[in-house]
Image (spheres, rainbow, N blue to C red):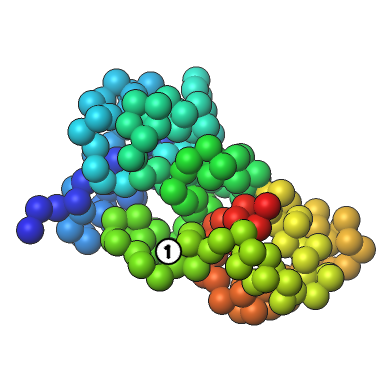
Amino acid sequence: MAQTSVYIVDDDEAVRDSLNVLLLTHDYNPKLYPSGEAFIEADLGSITGPILLDVRMPGRDGLEILKIALSRNPTLKVIMMSGHADVSMAVRALKNGATDFIEKPFSAKDMLVVLELATAKVENNPPLSATQQEARDTLAKLTPRESQIVSCLVKGQPNKVIAHELGISVRTVETHRAHVMSKLDIRSLSDLVKLSLAAE
């Protein structure tokens, strides 16, 4: 069985090295690019495996590289990698055609799950397949306070900012966030964002 190639686009050498080791040990074929410019010089039309694209890089940022890459090959599966402060940019990336995003720092387990979802034929993934009404019905399960938390999270606001804005403690925000994930039966912030986008 042929190994799945995974394209890693990140200017941080330590991130590239750690992902390289992780993917090699799990039978992927990693291909490393130190910049967006280096990546878009590749033969994008022949790429079938997932792409791990960092949001913030010198020169062209991840959003610009995403647009260029998808204009050349609309079938690309692009997973944005973002620091917590970059979540709002990752949301824009999802609207512009990215498949998923994962927050840094991420665990090996979370990364492998995201890659598996990107490469597998996933038939039952409610956040991805939900219609607008289904997404709205799902979000309607939330209390008014939980809905406020979701709105802030989707904007990319960290827990401290949400706590200040709503006049509650950070611990309370964390508790609400955990309840939201459990109540909606979703695994990650990216699924929450996709569900919110589907409801618009």
Horizontal side, residue 104 vs residue 178: left or right: left
Give, as a three-letter code, the residue at label 1: Asp
Residue sitting at x 46%, y 43%: 98
Q: Secondary structure at mark 1?
A: helix
Horizontal side, residue 5 vs residue 136: left or right: left
Q: Give the percent coordinates (x, y) of residue 27.
A: 17, 58
The answer to whether residue 76 is above or below residue 99 is: above
The quadrant holding residue 147 is bottom right
Residue 37 visible from this viewpoint: yes
The answer to whether residue 27 is above or below residue 54 is: below
Residue sitting at x 65%, y 44%: 88
The quadrant holding residue 146 is bottom right
The quadrant holding residue 143 is bottom right
Residue sitting at x 75%, y 57%: 151
Q: Give the percent coordinates (x, y) of residue 20.
A: 27, 48
Instruction: Determine the residue located farthest toward the right in the rendered image.
Output: 167
**What residue would you read off at disc 1?**
110
For label 1, count other residues whose C-alpha is less than 10 Å away and answer few (under 14), some (14-19) or many (20+).
some
The quarter of the image holding the N terminus is: bottom left
Residue sitting at x 49%, y 50%: 101
Image mark count: 1
Q: Give the percent coordinates (x, y) of residue 78.
A: 40, 43
Q: Give the percent coordinates (x, y) of residue 133.
A: 64, 64
Residue 160 visible from this viewpoint: no
The answer to whether residue 10 is above or below residue 81 is: above
